[in-house]
Image (tube, rainbow, N blue to C red):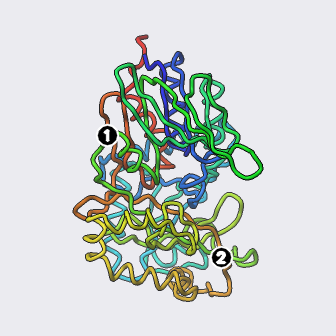
Amino acid sequence: MAGRVAVIGGGILGLAVARRIGQVDPDATVTVFEKEQDVARHQTGRNSGVVHAGLYYKPDSLKATLCRRGVGLLKEYCAAHHVRYEECGKIVIAVDDSELDRLADIESRAQANGVPGTSMLDAVGLRRYEPHARGVAALHSPTTAIVDYPAVARALREDVRDAGGSVRTGAEVTAVDDRGDGVHLGLRVRGTARVTPNGNHATASRAGGTVAEVFETVGPFDLLIACAGLQSDQVAALTGEDPSPQIVPFRGDYWLLRPERRGLVHGLIYPVPDPRYPFLGIHLTRRVDGEVLVGPNAVLATAREGYTLSTVQGSELRRTLAWPGFHKMARTHWKTGAREILRTASRRAFIAEARRYVPQLEAADVVRGPAGVRAQAVTRDGSLVDDFVLSINGRIVHVRNAPSPGATASLAIAEHIVSKVVPEPAA
């Protein structure tokens, strides 16, 4: 039996894990701790909203297996909880003959992964799906979808609560102490988050006498599962885990098509990705709210949660720059990094990349859109970690890396994690 369980992180994965524990062990008491004042404030709420079908991933990898399982679970979940889910379809375009071999490799992977309905298109065929797109060939994936991930996260939160669990927002985990009687957590509680009766705490007041922060200790817990996303390596460090891989944050900026130009894109238009990188490149993405995103780029963020150029966290930036893996990565990929910086500085350069696929697109057709930060795990030798990484040490579990398609696969990842640490009751 799971007993008392703590989950760190109120993104889609942490909430999916908390829900799954309640399904497997209804007697468990589950508490989710989220440092922000609401759920889905970071990667879950700042991505393009795509439900990936499983085109790109190496067959039999954890990514491929959990993505395909996750798509089915997510589609069913959205139908049951009245969350909009739209199979708008996706085309991956080869703009010239040099990309045909890589496109054929993606088709082979899609078939090996069991992605339904994919087909290769010629230059004429791709325009049946995207009349304004151009290329020498394309792979069509009719079941690639779009969804409102923050709405999914909110539904998961209610599932956790309905099962008797709790979701504490404004509660940042700052210490983890694994003692003989269980795991104890130190919290920095902000805003109106409630202090539990057994908490040991001190208060700090801001001007006017209102409480700004409360420091609290909670526990013991029989099991701790950390799904901390952008802060996953820092939370792992609280328990003495290996510092590798370290999170190197990459900001992704988007532009939005003006309403009168949204007709240029019917579904999802993607490039053939560079196999050296886990990023998929600048693409054009229709969202469930009707808006069309162009992007993202990928530039080093100056803060873990740095969604603007002006957001700089000196301690976080110094930590990134001091990581040996960062220097090795930068030496290997500096030319690509320079191109990404150019696109960041110049709207024309940014849109020129998207024009390779939609030639009618002009710089004047877009306005500044949202930005997200990707938690890219980088090893000590400079390698970009591509697959999911899970570490289990006794009663503490860390999700060290859950990149795209992490949101797509969240319900399946939750099944996978919980199956490792919470035995299902005998029938």
Residue positioned most to the left: 381
Tell how many labels: 2
Is residue 126 positioned above or below 109 on the image? below
Using the rendered view, name the quadrant where residue 128 is placed. Answer: bottom right
In terms of secondary structure, where does tag 2 sit? strand
Q: Amino acid at mark 2?
A: Arg
- Label 1 sits on residue: 391
Q: Nearer the viewer, residue 80 or 226?
A: 226
Look at the image and tell me in which quarter the C terminus lies.
top left
Q: Position of residue 99 (x, y in %)?
A: 35, 77
Q: Which mark is residue 368?
A: 2
Residue 230, percent from left and from top:
46, 54
Task: Give residue 196's position: percent from left, percent from top.
Answer: 62, 27
Residue positioned 45% across, 51% down in the render: 231
Query: In the rendered image of this protein, does residue 316 appear above or below residue 23?
Result: below
Vertical arrangement, residue 295 with respect to residue 43, above or below: below
